[in-house]
Amino acid sequence: EASTRSAKRATETGYSADVAQEIKDICADCGISLVTTLPDDWIAQTIATFEQDSRFTHVPANREESMVGLCSGAFLSGTGALALLGASGLMTLVYAITKINYTYEIPMFIMITQRGTFDDGAKFHVSNGLYLDAVMESIDLPHTVIRSRDELPLIAEAYHHSRKISRPTVAMLPKKLLQGKYFPLPYTGQRPNPTKYDPEQKVKVRGVSFGLRKSRETK
């Protein structure tokens, strides 16, 4: 009942049920069956969609570090897992991720809101816009921005990339995407492909970062 009310409220405030359904179906198709979440009003619709689908076990978390434990343990049991939370939550996880996932090479797939952007009306998320990318790059955390519905399949690619490199990966969800407002971007060159992994270099293409170390020559 609570998730139904949450989904209804999200629809009333402009968030797309269709986009939430697409995200959920892509996650199911790529093998995710456990989803742990922390609330953010941008993803309330998406959280409710996961909770109402019998293909998933939904575990609401009480703190961000619990999500690391749940997803890491799920991997060790052979269960595909997703941590879905706000951007500020990820910024509290630097120690837990580097201590557990980096040290023991445990994959973890994370989806976050791209807070702090120009269309974010919450002043208290300004710091996310200033530091979120820098924090992820400081620990060589591979991440991608899902800019349009055409790019939603990158969710599955990012999930499988985490398994391949035995480390966490992050997919960022902009507000306009979650509202169903983004349109496909013009093609500007090579499509980001997380299956091509070079441990000596991190390459950014159209806002997508893959790899573990950044060369001094790469901008």
Image: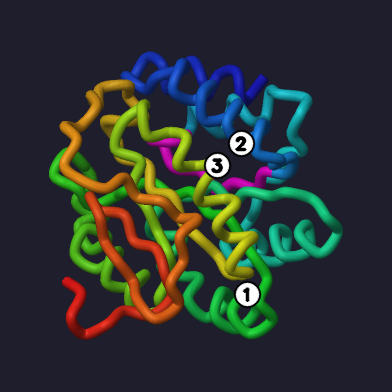
Which of discs 2 and 3 lies nearer the camera? The answer is 3
Who comes first in sequence, dot 3 or dot 1? Answer: 1
Secondary structure beneath dot 1 equals helix
Are discs 2 and 1 less than 8 Å apart at CB?
no
Q: Which residue is mark 3?
A: 156
Q: What amino acid is labelled 2 in the image? A: Cys
69 vs 199, left or right, is right
Which residue sits at x=33%, y=20%? 13
Boundaries of the magenta span: 35-43
Residue placed most toward the observer, 74 or 59: 74
Q: CA distance from mark 3 to mark 1?
A: 20 Å
Q: CA distance from mark 2 to mark 1?
A: 21 Å
Q: Residues within 10 Å of mark 2 (few under 14, many from 20)?
A: many
Are discs 2 and 3 less than 8 Å apart at CB?
yes
Residue placed most toward the observer, 10 or 68: 68
Q: Which residue is mark 2?
A: 27
77 vs 154, left or right, is right
Residue 156, placed above or below residue 144:
above
Who comes first in sequence, dot 2 or dot 1? Answer: 2
Which residue sits at x=24%, y=27%? 184
Q: What amino acid is labelled 3 in the image? A: Ala
Q: Position of residue 175 (x, y in %)?
A: 29, 35
Q: What amino acid is labelled 1 in the image? A: Asn
Q: Residue furthest right?
A: 77
Secondary structure beneath dot 2 equals helix
Residue placed most toward the observer, 140 or 52: 140
12 vs 163, left or right, is left
Q: Residues within 10 Å of mark 1 (few under 14, many from 20)?
A: some
